[in-house]
Image (cartoon, grey):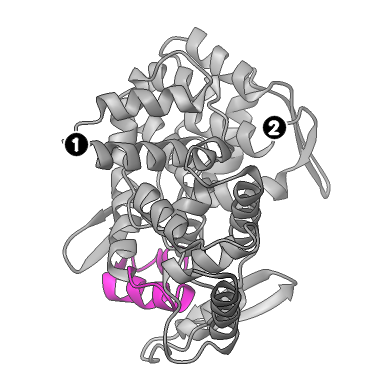
Amino acid sequence: MNKSNKTGHRERLNERFIKGGKSPHTEKTLLELLLTYSIPQKDVLPLAKSLLEKFGSLSDVLSADVSSLCEISGVKISSAILFKLVDWIRKHYTVKEDKVKQLGLFDVSVSEPGKVVVKKEKKDKKVSLEPVNPDRGAVLFTKALLKEAISILPKFPDTESVPEIKEFLRNNLHFSSQTTRERYANYITSRLYPSGYADRSLRLFALKYQGRQELRDICFYRLCKAEPVVYDVIHDLIIPSIGHGKIDRDKLRDYLRICFPSSKSIGDGSQAIVEALTGANIARSDRTSFSFSYRQILLPSFAFILHSEFPESGIYDIGKLENNRAINSMLWKPDGLLTSLYELRNQGFISKISEIDSVRQFTTRFTLEEVVNQLSDKGDVL
């Protein structure tokens, strides 16, 4: 492609994106447009195709760690950083109020910016499929692989290197295709290590609790950190319906169409979310619906997630724990949180709890790795 054609093509990409219209943005054109901002004066379409072939979807390209991205010929550190910037923004900024209102399922009020209060369910109201943000793009993940991750995690090599773990997965996953094993190795590592660092804490926890619900809890927690759309589904659909205990899969697909109006993978994305929920034993499913209820809190899981969400030793407001998005997404019984917090204090995992008048606080004393080491030392007491 000569220089004038390249310039014209880039202008057309920009104009097509700005105008929007009835033609949906494809993952390929969105990725191609993104690459034009980090790679000047070069045809980036072949690179966009290579990235999608390697990682499987736009969501997984954005979620991939920097080292994996830079392994692809043509991807420099500037492009990798741009991807991670977009990934960070899309995972940390959501339009919850608009999504819930457009879904037409609940009455909502906003008590403070960014916080949605669900009042009551509206029964018989049709769902509007007008997109919340037509320029959001298709970034819905389409493979959960949670069961595979839970099964193989205790066998991980003793390393903090993500590339070494990927190599282990490429050699040990049960899929026959080398391309599939490579792609799934990227999926699993990006979900288990959303920070891009293969922390020792997770591997030690897996060795201690392999085959048990505690490990399923932690792997689901890590997946949600990597794919926050699962948080959205739990908070916007599941928790408001907890009394009913069941949601039709069609309602989940309608919700995802609103969140990801340009995605052509709504069915796969819906299936991936249900597989994540069922793989963690948080929900049960059949062909038309999935069901759920609040669960008993397992203290090791609670200790791990508490110290992940409040990693620095110090004093914290109990209200921040009770309203924590990750904690609530585990569907643990809300009235069991305070009891479990006191039990952590009794077991020596946290320093103290204060409930005096309106002051409600808890004090942590250990890092996550120190907590996991203590769990390993306690045998089967917890």
Q: Closest to the observer: 150 or 293? A: 150
Tell me whether circle 2 and circle 1 mark residues in contact (CB < 8 Å): no
Q: Position of residue 186 (x, y in %)?
A: 40, 40
Residue 96: quadrant of the picture:
bottom right
Where 14 sits versus 202, above or below?
below
Place of residue 316 in the rendered image (x, y in percent of width and height, measured from the top left): 77, 39
| Category of crowding for the residue at label 2, using alpha-carbon neighbours closer than 10 angstroms: few (below 14), some (14–19), many (at least 20) | some
User: Looking at the image, is mark 2 or mark 1 nearer the viewer?
Assistant: 1
Q: Residue at left 27%, top 62%?
A: 290
Q: Please state which amino acid type lies under the numbered disc 1.
A: Phe
Q: Position of residue 269 (x, y in %)?
A: 34, 62
Which label number is shown at residue 349?
none
Residue at mark 2:
311
In the rendered image, is residue 99 in sight? yes
Q: Residue at x 56, y 48 (%)?
A: 326
Marks 2/1: CA–CA distance:
37 Å
* Element on which disc 2 rests: loop
| Quadrant of the rendered image containing residue 367 | top right
Q: Residue at x 64, y 43 (%)?
A: 77
- Asked if residue 159 is positioned above or below residue 39 in the image, the reply reads above
Q: Is 288 on the left-hand or right-hand side of 245?
A: left
| Amino acid type assigned to the residue bearing label 2 in the image | Pro
Q: Which residues are magenta?
A: 237-265
Pointer 1 local density, CA inside 10 Å: few below 14, some 14–19, many at least 20 = few
Q: Which mark is residue 175?
A: 1
- Mark earlier in primary sequence (2, 1): 1
Q: Determine the secondary structure under disc 1.
A: loop
User: Above or below — where is 194 with respect to 60?
Assistant: above
